[in-house]
Image: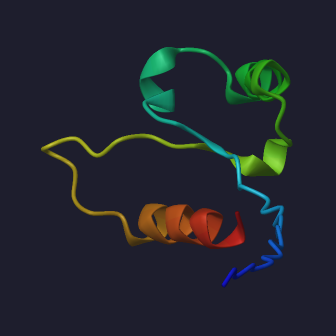
């Protein structure tokens, strides 16, 4: 007695867009104008300027800045 089986394989390919963005910190300590460096960085990593967040870090003596935190969170939500 012989038995034969036939199998069909289905291959599903999903293309998922991975968000790419940049976060540049310590901008306040760099001494470089933000406008000049932003274009260069965006060109170097091939992203739009709206996907680059340039921010300054908190220092131990700084009080928390709600506006700074909100701008960072808004950026992360949009990308």
Quadrant of image for the C terminus: bottom right
Residue nearest the viewer, comparing 27 with 76: 76
Rendering coords of residue 41 (x, y %)? 73, 23
In the displayed structure, 17 sits above or below 74; it is above
In the displayed structure, 68 sits above or below 34; it is below
Q: Residue furthest left?
A: 60
- Asked where in the image residue 59 lies, by quadrant, the reply is top left
- Asked where in the image residue 22 lies, by quadrant, the reply is top right
Q: Please give the name of the residue rendered at 71% of the width and 55% of the height, measured from the top-left corner.
A: 19
Callout count: 0
Q: In the picture provided, is 36 more to the left or to the right than 61?
A: right
Residue nearest the viewer, comparing 9 with 74: 9
Q: In the picture provided, is 76 more to the left or to the right than 47?
A: left
The colour scheme used to paint the residues is: rainbow
Q: Please give the name of the residue rendered at 43% of the width and 66% of the height, measured from the top-left corner.
A: 69
Rendering coords of residue 16 (x, y %)? 78, 63
In the displayed structure, 43 sits above or below 23; it is above
Q: Residue furthest front?
A: 1
- Asked where in the image residue 35 lies, by quadrant, the reply is top right
In the displayed structure, 34 sits above or below 36; it is below
Q: Please give the name of the residue rendered at 62% of the width and 73% of the height, measured from the top-left corner.
A: 77
Rendering coords of residue 54 (x, y %)? 59, 40
Quadrant of image for the N terminus: bottom right
């Amino acid at each position: 007695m012989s038995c034969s089986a036939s199998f069909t394989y289905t291959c599903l390919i999903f293309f998922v867009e991975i968000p790419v963005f940049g976060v540049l910190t310590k901008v306040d300590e760099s001494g470089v104008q933000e406008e000049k460096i932003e274009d260069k960085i965006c060109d170097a990593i091939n992203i739009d300027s709206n996907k680059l967040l340039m921010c300054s870090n908190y220092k131990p003596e700084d009080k928390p800045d709600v506006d700074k935190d909100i701008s960072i969170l808004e950026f992360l939500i949009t990308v």
